[in-house]
C-alpha cells in the first residue's frame, strides 16, 4: 500500500511527519473509530482517518462534527465507562491470577477499537505484560487464546455452579 508523508505542525512549532496510507484519504471507507468517537476518537487514530481535518495543530472530525483533543484512547470518557464496566464484570480482579492491583483491560483480538465486552478481559499489569510478551513469540497467540478460554470457562463455572 502506498503512503505519503504529511507534515503536521505542533504547538511547539516543531514539525513532525506522518506516513499516511492512501486509505487515509478514502471517504468510502468507514471511520477508523468504528462509529464510536466517544470511545475511540483520539489523535493517534484520527490522524489516519479520512474524515479528520487537520488544521493549525488541531483535528476536527467531519463525520461526527467534533473536535478531537484526546492524545490517547484511554483518556476518553467513553472508554473509562467501558473500562469500569469490564472491571466490575470481572470482580475487580485479574482474570488470570486473581490479583486486584494495577488492573488493565486487555483487547483479546488486539484491536483497540473493538470494545465489545466479549473482546475485553481484566488483567493485572504483570499478566498483561506476559500476555503481550507471549504474543510476540512463535505459537504465542495459540497459547494466549488457550489461557483466555480456560479462564473464561473457570469464570463461567464459578457463576453457574
Image (spheres, rainbow, N blue to C red):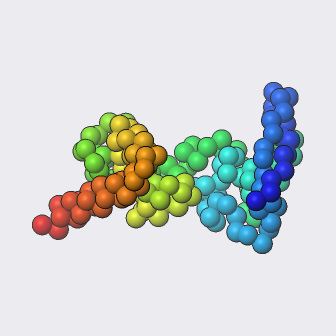
At horizontal 17% and vertical 61% (from top left) the residue drawn is: 158
Residue 72 sits above or below residue 13 on the image: below
Does 53 sit left or right of 133 as displayed?
A: right
Residue located farthest toward the left when viewing the structure as drawn: 161
Does 133 sit left or right of 111 as displayed?
A: left
How far across and how far down the image is residue 109, in percent? 47, 59
Quadrant housing the N terminus = bottom right
How far across and how far down the image is residue 79, in percent? 52, 52
Residue 75 sits above or below residue 52 on the image: above
Residue located farthest toward the front when viewing the structure as drawn: 138
How far across and how far down the image is residue 117, in percent? 42, 62
Q: Nearer the viewer, residue 77 or 160?
A: 160
Does 152 sit left or right of 108 as displayed?
A: left
Does 15 sit left or right of 131 as displayed?
A: right
Q: Nearer the viewer, residue 54 or 146?
A: 146
Can residue 84 be seen? no
At horizontal 36% and vertical 50% (from top left) the residue drawn is: 122
Can residue 83 be seen? yes
At horizontal 26% and vertical 57% (from top left) the residue drawn is: 151
Amino acid at each position: 500500500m502506498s503512503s505519503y508523508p504529511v507534515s503536521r505542525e505542533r504547538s511547539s512549532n516543531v514539525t513532525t511527519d506522518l506516513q499516511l496510507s492512501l486509505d487515509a484519504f478514502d471517504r468510502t471507507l468507514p471511520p477508523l473509530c468504528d462509529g464510536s468517537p466517544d470511545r475511540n476518537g483520539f489523535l493517534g487514530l484520527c490522524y489516519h482517518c479520512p474524515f479528520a481535518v487537520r488544521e493549525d495543530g488541531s483535528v476536527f472530525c467531519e463525520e461526527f462534527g467534533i473536535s478531537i483533543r484526546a492524545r490517547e484512547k484511554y483518556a476518553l470518557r467513553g472508554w473509562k465507562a467501558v473500562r469500569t464496566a469490564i472491571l466490575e464484570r470481572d470482580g475487580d480482579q485479574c482474570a488470570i491470577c486473581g490479583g486486584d492491583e494495577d488492573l488493565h483491560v486487555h483487547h483479546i483480538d488486539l484491536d483497540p477499537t473493538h470494545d465489545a465486552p466479549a473482546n475485553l478481559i481484566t488483567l493485572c499489569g504483570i499478566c498483561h505484560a506476559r500476555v503481550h510478551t507471549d504474543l510476540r513469540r512463535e505459537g504465542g497467540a495459540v497459547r494466549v487464546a488457550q489461557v483466555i478460554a480456560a479462564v473464561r470457562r473457570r469464570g463461567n463455572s464459578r457463576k453457574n455452579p
